[in-house]
Image (cartoon, coloured by chain):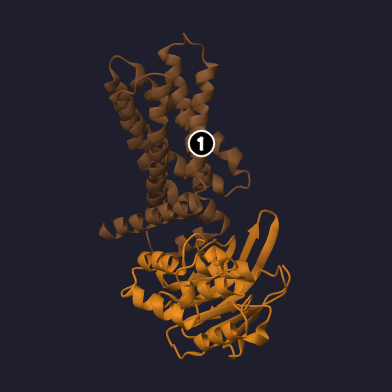
Chain colours: A brown, B orange
Amino acid sequence: MIGYLSDVTALARKDLLVELRSRDTVPAMLLFVVATLVVFHFALPDDSSRLAAAGMLWIALLFTALLALVRSFVAERDEAVIDGLLLAPCDRSAIWLGKTLSVFAFLALAEAVALPAFALFYEPVTWELIAGVALANIGIAAVGTLLGAMAAASRARELLLPLLFLPLAIPLIVGGVGATLAENPGRYLGFLGLYDLIFAILSWASFEYVVTE
Amino acid sequence: MIHARGLARRFGDKRVLTGVDVDVGTGELLLVTGPNGSGKTTLLRLLAGLIVPTGGELDVAVDRARIGFLGHEPLLYRELTPLENLDLYGRLYRIHERRERIGMLLERFGLWDARREQTGAFSRGMLQRLALCRALLHEPDLLLLDEPFSALDAAGTELLLDELAKPMPSRTVVVASHLPERLGTTPTAHLALGSA
């Protein structure tokens, strides 16, 4: 178990270091999410409902996440580094978990900018919203990393990933918007937690079959 | 260590490798030659377990942790330095005293002075040297080298030949090359692949 966690830590640390040096993903995510919220701010009429604002926020977060997910396995596929990782004696699921943790960190950074921007342009951020975003992040990172690995094997990954990911993200949107707006957000937060648990286990267990023949 | 009968591999409709028989014992050096497109790279990827055969039998009697693989790509992160790249692999391979081992390899392959530079700025030859360090890092029992001399200058070639000439009875080496005359050492077995 200690060896497994050590592999996960080394792989996640590597992804953070690569991003720190290349700055390919996070700056694009930050610009995109802020620009989207600004555009929505001007697109929505002044008397638009809280429901519309919350929906816009979740759409912005989901499409921002796609930017991270599309690029999540670029280095591994373009430079064939995935072969080196697959040859290493570590459990292949450690590759998925390390990547999921780094994607989660990138999403959290984007949301650390997006939520204050949402409060500035729309309405105050509640604890329920923060909890919903945190739980949705786990699901997005878990499922998105698995699908990102599948899509990365294709030359049409920019087209393939949204087609694979968006249908599976619908429950996250339902849960996220519900947690943001419902009188009893606990139900929706529980739903997001259940989604995270089920899809994290499925992704963890199936990653090896996605990246090997 | 390696036993293959009627080994075949196709990608879609294209047959890349057909009916290959190979037997390589522990400590032997197999040279694989053949023209472009004859399946040398595919054979090495099959031996490494990176792809699976579509026909025939293949038995590679070594754990994947004991395989060292040098492919066409260096399998390194361009944003990381040689130290960081090798440290990542060293951790994944659970190498004891990995810092000493990494330092020794970088020194031997003439990369010590560039150890803190990002590999994205390396020349093709330097990348190949670093890829050799990666493949040798865990002292593999089965070393698979695909066109190892490509991009290496005379000094780099000499370093590789020195490595291959080391008396290591437990190490089996498979070299795929279309320049067999550069191997120097006499191989114990030779497999000539034709066009598939």
User: Of A208 and A4, which appears nearest the observer?
Assistant: A4
What is the chain identity of the residue bearing mark 1?
Answer: A
- Give me the residue at 49% from left, 35% from top: A64
Q: Does residue A30 sit above or below A80 in this rendering?
A: above
Task: Report if residue B163 is visible in the image.
Answer: yes
Q: In the picture, residue A188 is in which quadrant?
A: top left
Q: In the picture, residue B115 is in which quadrant?
A: bottom left
Q: Is residue A54 left or right of residue A135?
A: right
Q: Where does the image place residue B18, in percent across and percent down from the top left? A: 66, 67
Q: Does residue B161 sit above or below A96 in this rendering?
A: below
Q: How many marks?
A: 1
Q: Where does the image place residue A13, in percent across and percent down from the top left? A: 38, 55
- Give me the residue at 43% from left, 39% from top: A143
Q: Where does the image place residue A186, in percent across and percent down from the top left? A: 27, 22
- Give me the residue at 51% from left, 11% from top: A45
- Mark 1 = which residue? A31
- SS category of the residue bearing label 1: helix
Q: Residue furthest top?
A: A47
User: Of A70 and B178, which appears nearest the observer?
Assistant: A70
The amino acid type, in three-letter code, at marker 1 is Leu
Q: Does residue B92 sit above or below A64 in this rendering?
A: below
- Quadrant into which the N terminus of chain A falls: bottom left
Task: Report if residue A213 is visible in the image.
Answer: no
Local crowd size for mark 1, using a 10 Å CA cut-off: few (<14), some (14–19), many (≥20): some
